[in-house]
Amino acid sequence: MSASLILLEAGQAAAAPIVQASLTGGVEGSIISMVLNAGPVVKLVMGLLVLASFVSWAIILIKLVQLSRAQNHSAKFLDSFWKSRSLANLFADLGNYSGSPIAQIFRVGYQELGRVHKARLDTRTAMGNVERALRRAASAESSRLYKSLSFLATCGNTTPFVGLFGTVWGIMGSFHEIGVKGSANLAAVAPGISEALIATAAGLLCAIPAVIFYNYFNSRIRILETDMGNFMADFVNILERDLLKKPAVQNKEEY
């Protein structure tokens, strides 16, 4: 037998135990197996973190769709508003801008305008009623946009500590085992600590996306709130300049 064949067979024989050990360790050391081998408290913590993460991602996806729709519909509505010659026609087409908070503010303001005309109120009283209606509508739309964001803030603030609690509890269990067995070598400590540290990792995995998207959504909502405020000011100016100077006996369908 040649020297090269002897070396090849020797290398294969030496590598076989290493490959077998790596495969076995890969299976036994997987994250799933470590979670399954963890204590009941750590499992409970992991379950809570998985549930919080699932709810957080559901809120994130819903808010992404909602805010994108709000911005797109608002841009289209504002374009139609400034091009429209009849507020009555624009009011009739509001179904095309159902996702726009600005369109909803216009709807409330226009409806209040019709009521003050029917009541034949003087200009100052009528404008006061319309402005209050616009502010209430803007507040309601802001509350709708911010809805569920508090859960993301809560996850970002608390889930790392929940994971840390699971880690501390797991490490306590590991040290208890050391005391019972009377052995402090790495082989006795490492499995329990590695299982416990998964809880901290899970808490961070839940908190990081929640914090990132919470800040992202807040910035987008603030932009929408600025647009709502600008529209309210422009709408009130238009009413004062053009509409409420007309005789109060006119019907709202004329505008």
Image (spheres, helix red, strand yellow):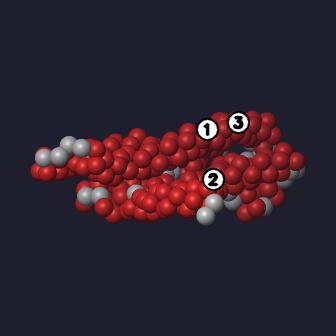
Q: Secondary structure at mark 3?
A: helix
Task: Name the mark nearer the viewer: 1 or 3.
Answer: 1
Q: Disc 1 to disc 3, how far (Cα)?
A: 17 Å
Please state if 127 lies on the left or on the right of 190 as rendered: right
Quarter of image, res 139? top right
Other residues around mark 2 within 10 Å, as few (<14) / some (14–19) / many (≥20): some
Question: Which amino acid lies under the numbered mark 1 shown in the image of this protein?
Answer: Ser
Question: Which amino acid lies under the numbered mark 2 shown in the image of this protein?
Answer: Leu
x and y percentages locating residue 78 in the rendered image: 79, 46
- Residue on which the image places disc 3: 230
Q: Nearer the viewer, residue 12 or 85?
A: 12
Q: Residue at x 63, y 60 (%)?
A: 2
Task: Name the mark nearer the viewer: 2 or 3.
Answer: 2
Q: Earlier in the sequence, mark 1 or mark 3?
A: 1
Q: Nearer the viewer, residue 174 or 166?
A: 174
Other residues around mark 1 within 10 Å, as few (<14) / some (14–19) / many (≥20): few
Quarter of image, res 224? top right
Question: Which amino acid lies under the numbered mark 3 shown in the image of this protein?
Answer: Asn
- Residue on which the image places disc 1: 219
Q: Residue at x 77, y 48 (%)?
A: 75
x and y percentages locating residue 248 in the rendered image: 73, 47
Question: In the drawing, what numbered circle is on residue 64?
Answer: 2
